Image (cartoon, rainbow, N blue to C red):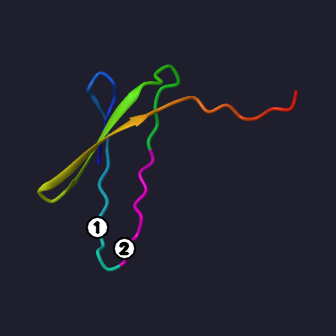
Amino acid sequence: MTFYNPENMITSEQIQQLNLDNKLIYNFTLSTSLLQRLVYRCIFRIELCWCAKNIRIETIKPNTAE
């Protein structure tokens, strides 16, 4: 998986082995700058096939009792 920031620069590349027997959900952990809350792009490649997905990053604020 390749993770691109809004300026189209690669910020992370991660590789996981695909196991067709287990049919598991694969997890990729990413981090972003606190100042950049925009749309990022991920590209997943499996052999010759690829899939691109835009991911919107927003700030999550915890609920506080006031």
| Magenta stretch encompasses residue 35 | no
Q: What secondary structure is the stretch in magenta mostly built from?
A: loop
22 displayed left or right of 44:
right
Front-most of 18 and 55?
55
Measured as percent of width and height from the top left, residue 30 is found at 44, 42
Residue lying at 76% horizontally and 35% vertically, measured from the top left = 63
Please say if 37 is above or below 41: above
Q: What residue would you read off at disc 1?
A: 18
Callout 2: SS: loop
Tell me the quarter of the image containing the C terminus: top right
Q: Hey, which quadrant is residue 53 in on the image?
A: top left
30 displayed left or right of 51:
right
Name which of mark 1 and mark 2 comes first in the sequence.
1
Q: What residue would you read off at disc 2?
A: 23
Residue lying at 26% horizontally and 26% vertically, measured from the top left = 8
Measured as percent of width and height from the top left, residue 5 is found at 34, 28
| Magenta stretch encompasses residue 28 | yes
45 displayed left or right of 19:
left
Label 2 crowding class (10 Å Cα cut-off): few <14, some 14-19, many 20+? Answer: few
Task: Please name the amino acid that badge 1 sits on.
Answer: Leu
2 displayed left or right of 55:
left
Please say if 18 is above or below 8: below
Callout 1: SS: loop
Label 1 crowding class (10 Å Cα cut-off): few <14, some 14-19, many 20+? Answer: few
Measured as percent of width and height from the top left, residue 28 is found at 41, 51
Task: Please name the amino acid that badge 2 sits on.
Answer: Lys
Residue lying at 11% horizontally and 57% vertically, measured from the top left = 48
> Which region of the structure is painted magenta?
22-29
